[in-house]
Amino acid sequence: MNAGPLPGSPGKLDAIAKARAAWGEAIPVEIRVLAEACKAETSRAVAKRLGYSDAVVSHVLAAKYPGDMAKVFTKIRGALMGETVMCPILDEIGRDRCLSEQAKPFAATNSTRARLFHACKSCPNRQQKDVA
């Protein structure tokens, strides 16, 4: 059973210290904002806002995430930094929601979802890769 850090050991680094240790002086603004959000609330809560697991947030802070870092940065800018885009269907939305909508499948039972599916194909904000 793990009872925590040993007495006298440095213990767990906070999110900001972890990010600085991994990214160095050239820490991107998105990583700094992510670390500050994780310090203000739990990494699990921040991960949920971004649509990722808390393990992904931890890997991103540690500069060890093997996935699409540009997509993570875009989600951070939308969910945590307030970046918005103009959607032809939904009007002004957060950049993170834009990415989420792009990833959703076609749904003939929902007219908005169907319109979004078709509009997202040719939208200048499109970042999602085609899987066909």
Image: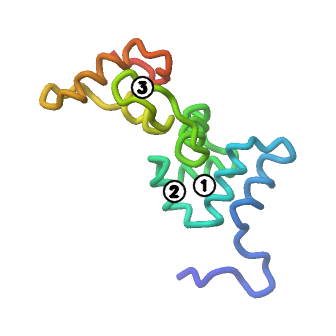
Q: Residue at x 59, y 84 (%)?
A: 3
Task: Specify few, some or many for label 1: CA neighbours under 10 Å numbering under 14, 14-19, or 20 or more.
Answer: many
Residue at image point 54% right, 49% down: 56
What element does badge 1 sit on?
helix
Return the x and y of residue 13 as percentages of the image width and height: 73, 67
* CB under 8 Å between discs 3 and 1: no
Residue at image location 47% in from the left, 52% down from the top: 49
Q: Earlier in the sequence, mark 3 or mark 1?
A: 1
Which corner quadrant of the image does residue 116 belong to? top left
Spatial CA distance of label 2 from label 3 is: 29 Å
Label ID, residue 125: none
Residue 110 vs residue 6, the one in the foreground: 110
Relative vertical location of residue 19 with respect to residue 42 in this rendering, above or below: above
Q: Residues within 10 Å of mark 2 (few under 14, many from 20)?
A: some
- Residue wearing tag 2: 54
Assess whether mark 2 and mark 1 are in contact (beta carbons under 8 angstroms). yes
> Marks 2 and 3: which is nearer the front?
3
- Outermost residue to the front: 91
Q: Is residue 18 left or right of residue 1?
A: right
Residue type pointed to by label 1: Ser
Residue closest to the far right: 25
Q: Nearer the viewer's eye, disc 3 or disc 1?
A: 3
Coordinates of residue 41 in the picture (x, y in percent): 57, 66
- Which label belongs to residue 87? 3
Please give the residue where the numbered disc 1 appears in the rendered image.
58
The residue shown at (53%, 34%) is 84
Q: Seen from this angle, which residue lies furthest bottom? A: 7
> Do residues under tags 2 and 3 come within 8 Å of each other at their CB atoms?
no
Q: Is residue 78 left or right of residue 64?
A: left
Q: Position of residue 18 (x, y in %)?
A: 74, 58
